[in-house]
Image: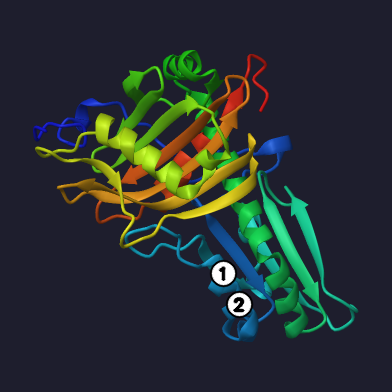
Amino acid sequence: MKKSGVFSLFMSALLISFVFPSCTSQQGNNGKTASIGTTAELLVVTQNQEQWENQIGQTIKKYFAADMYGFPQPESIFKIIHIKTDNFSEVYKTERNIFIVDINPKVKEAKIIVERDKWAAPQLIYKIIAPTPMSFVKAFMIKKDYFIEKYLAFERQRILKVFKSSLDDKVMKNIKNHFSFTLDVPSGFYVAKATPNFMWIRHEASQSSQGILIISIPYKDTTQFLRDKILERIQRFQMHNIPGPSTGSYMSLDRKFVLPMDTRITNFPTHFAVEIRGLWRVEHDFMGGPFISYTFLNKNTNQIVTLFGYVYYPNHRKRDLLLQIESILYSVKFGNSGKK
């Protein structure tokens, strides 16, 4: 493959890029103040510094600031900002994602309160009220995965709302004609390659690259949902369709240093899907980055579909760019009604 191959960024200045704002506008939903905060930013409010430095804070940081799986360099799930209750001013109350610690000996048992758009919009607030630090930690541990899932889903919804104002109808129509479903693809992405059962959609910026692969083949049996079957299928399409920047190079998956991790999920728009996270790389070259994929059955066409999203952004943080791609994948819709 020539150096001007598909992964080369030399021509990226000629391509249209989109701007993704980190904060919302001045007015939020229902006329409330617009919430603030960068992508995946989480404000944690404790009653005092001791709570943050001891078991409560240590537990919160262990899970909310855990490393994202499949990244070449450590990047946390959330960017945590911590303040004490005394400093929880009106400005901080406009943060988009808020988690509040309330240790109150007067309550008999721990309880979880969820509120939306309380001080700003959009806004998601979780609060755990517990009689003791130990009971707080116990309640948190039971629901930690739930909290993470809900905050990330809230971020995806916000990202898609931003994208809604600048969707590329041409790309979306192309996807629908090929696969009988749609994705909310914003301006700046374009179709780089399309065959009857494959499509490569790209976005190029000055230093970064984002992409989506759509793979669709006839459904035969449930073994097609096994992790290794999915990975082999992805690699086969990558090898034949995504050449790298140097002669003989092509896109592939890292299955040696970072083992791709699969999860069966039911919160995808198609309900059941197999999610896989890991690292992609280029065979015979030195490129790579994180990926996420979702494999599901399109019942309308009886096709098994894999949506594969990736990011290339060497020497920079990639979490926010991958979350943008993940949000696009979560926008999949079937049929003419537009309903998920």
Q: Name the residue under label 2.
A: 59
Residue displayed at 62% across by 48% down: 265
Color encoding of the figure: rainbow
Give the crowd class for mark 1: few <14, some 14-19, many >=20 residues within 10 Å.
some
Quadrant location, the C terminus = top right
Left or right: 47 in relation to 257? right
Q: Where is residue 269 in the image (x, y as percent from the top left)?
A: 63, 35
Quadrant location, the N terminus = top left
Mark 1 is on which residue type? Tyr
Q: Cα distance, mark 2 to mark 1?
A: 7 Å
Q: Nearer the viewer, residue 308 or 189?
A: 308
Label ID, residue 51: none
Label ID, residue 63: 1
- Tag 1, which secondary structure? helix
- Tag 2, which secondary structure? helix
CB atoms at circles 2 and 1 under 8 Å apart? Answer: yes
